[in-house]
Amino acid sequence: MKHFIYICFLFLIVVFFSFINSFNNVENFTPGIRQFYRPIIRNTRLISEGFYNKTTTNISNFLRKIAII
């Protein structure tokens, strides 16, 4: 019974600290630099994916209309 209480106590400590650390969203290494360039990379990726998808759709539609595909 005593070991069960110790195991439950250790489990609660682990859960507590994991819950507290889940709110920490700061980058560990060069946080200022990463806060600056991550949104730029994300926006660039979204724009390029949108351009690619739009372009491939337009090209495939055009090729279907002229009966190549």
Image: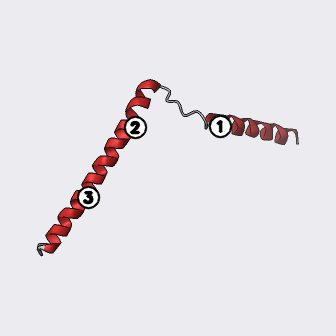
Between residues 13 and 60, which one lies in front from this camera angle? 60
Q: Position of residue 19 (x, y in %)?
A: 66, 38
Q: Earlier in the sequence, mark 2 or mark 1?
A: 1
Query: Between marks 2 and 1, how big is the CA–CA gap?
Result: 27 Å
- On the image, the x and y values in percent for residue 10 come to 75, 36
Could you tell me how far apart the alpha carbons at marks 3 and 2 are, in whole angstroms? 22 Å
Residue 20: quadrant of the picture: top right
Hey, what amino acid is under mark 2?
Pro
Q: Can you identify the residue that label 3 sits on?
A: 54
| x and y, in percent, of residue 47 in the image | 31, 47
Q: Please state which of the two labelled residues, at mark 3 or mark 1, is closer to the viewer.
A: 3
Q: Is residue 30 visible?
A: no
Crowding near the residue tagged with mark 1, few <14, some 14–19, many ≥20 C-alpha atoms within 10 Å: few
Q: Is residue 10 visible?
A: yes
Q: Name which of mark 3 and mark 1 comes first in the sequence.
A: 1
At 35% from the left and 38% from the top, the residue drawn is 41
In the depicted view, which residue is nearer to us: 30 or 57? 57
The CA span between labels 3 and 1 is: 43 Å
The outermost residue toward the right is 1
Q: What residue is at 65 percent from the left and 37 percent from the top? A: 18
The residue type indicated by label 3 comes to: Lys
What residue is shown with label 2? Answer: 39
Mark 3 vs 2: CB contact within 8 A: no
Kindly identify which residue carries mark 1.
18
Looking at the image, residue 11 lies above or below residue 55: above
Q: Above or below — where is 18 with respect to 32? A: below
Residue 18 position (above or below residue 63): above
